[in-house]
Image: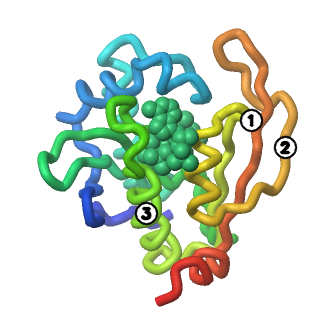
Amino acid sequence: MPAFEPTHLNTERLALRPIIAADAPALLAIFSDPQAMRYWSSEPWTVLLQAEAYVDYITLGRQDGSALCFGVTLAAGGALIGTCTLYAFDHRNRRCEMGYMLSRAHWGHGYMPEALAAMLDHGFDTLDLHRVEADIHPDNAASERVLERLRFQREGRLRERWFVGGELSDSVIYGLLRADWHAARPR
Ligand SMILES: CC(C)(COP(=O)(O)OP(=O)(O)OC[C@H]1O[C@@H](n2cnc3c(N)ncnc32)[C@H](O)[C@@H]1OP(=O)(O)O)[C@@H](O)C(=O)NCCC(=O)NCCS
């Protein structure tokens, strides 16, 4: 698959940019927080090597066209406060999945919906996607609020799809069509 261009996106309060090797310590700080990782599909990270492996995965994904990850930074300051990612691309059917993580210190300010809106604009308008999916833990109310705000529709529940922290958990699947997005954001 064709590589994704290194992409920068700007919103009112945020700058989204490619993840680089120097981000590994900041990524470890974010992804090692057990509360932030409560509903993630893997355990909280414990060592820098995991963050470095993630940077490698993201870099490879951009090169082989399978994932496009943005580092989320505050426009005024530049520190990395989270990530949002389009991944699991099915290029033939013009669809992919979406994931996101914000440092707990920055929750509750609407930063992630703002970042995701910019990423979705890019996905639908520049990458020509037709559909974006999200898979969330049934108890992840904050994530559900974010998806509903972005006009994702709840499409179903898949049973016992993840085994995390010694527990099996279901997935709630959300979908957003290009038409839903453009209806919600007329231009
Ligand atoms: C889900 C997440 C991205 C939301 O980002 P955000 O920028 O805080 O989003 P918002 O500010 O719009 O808040 C969304 C909801 O989070 C909840 N929330 C806000 N502040 C919170 C806090 N300090 N603690 C717990 N929940 C909080 C609220 O329910 C809020 O909904 P409301 O605005 O209707 O009250 C963020 O909580 C996060 O990164 N969580 C951990 C990772 C995760 O679960 N990712 C999704 C996996 S699919």
Q: Are marks 1 and 3 in contact (CB under 8 Å)?
A: no
Tell us which disc is closer to us: 1 or 3: 1
Structural crowding at the residue carrying mark 3, measured as other residues with C-alpha within 10 Å and reported as few (<14), some (14–19) or many (≥20): many
Q: Quadrant of residue 150?
A: bottom right
Q: Quadrant of residue 96?
A: bottom right
- Between the C-alphas of marks 1 and 2, the distance is 8 Å
Q: Is 30 on the left or on the right of 77, as rendered?
A: right
Number of numbered tags placed on the structure image: 3
Please name the residue shown 42% across and 19% down the image. 33
| Between discs 1 and 2, the one toward the N terminus | 1
Question: Where 29 sits versus 185, above or below?
Answer: above
Report which residue position mark 1 lands on: 138
How far from the left and from the top, in percent, is residue 112? 43, 50
Question: Where 180 sits versus 33, above or below?
Answer: below
Numbered badge on residue 20: none
How far from the left and from the top, in percent, is residue 116? 45, 58
Please name the residue shown 26% across and 55% down the image. 17
* Residue at disc 2, secondary structure: strand
Q: Looking at numbered disc 1 in the image, what kind of residue is underneath it? A: Pro
Report which residue position mark 3 lands on: 119
Q: Are marks 1 and 2 in contact (CB under 8 Å)?
A: yes
Q: Is 146 on the left or on the right of 162, as rendered?
A: left
* Residue at disc 1, secondary structure: loop
In-front residue for pair 46/117: 117
Q: Is 127 on the left or on the right of 183, as rendered?
A: left
| Between discs 1 and 3, the one toward the N terminus | 3
Tell us which disc is closer to us: 1 or 2: 1
Report which residue position mark 2 lands on: 157
* Residue at disc 3, secondary structure: helix
Q: Is 162 on the left or on the right of 109, as rendered?
A: right
- Between the C-alphas of marks 1 and 3, the distance is 24 Å
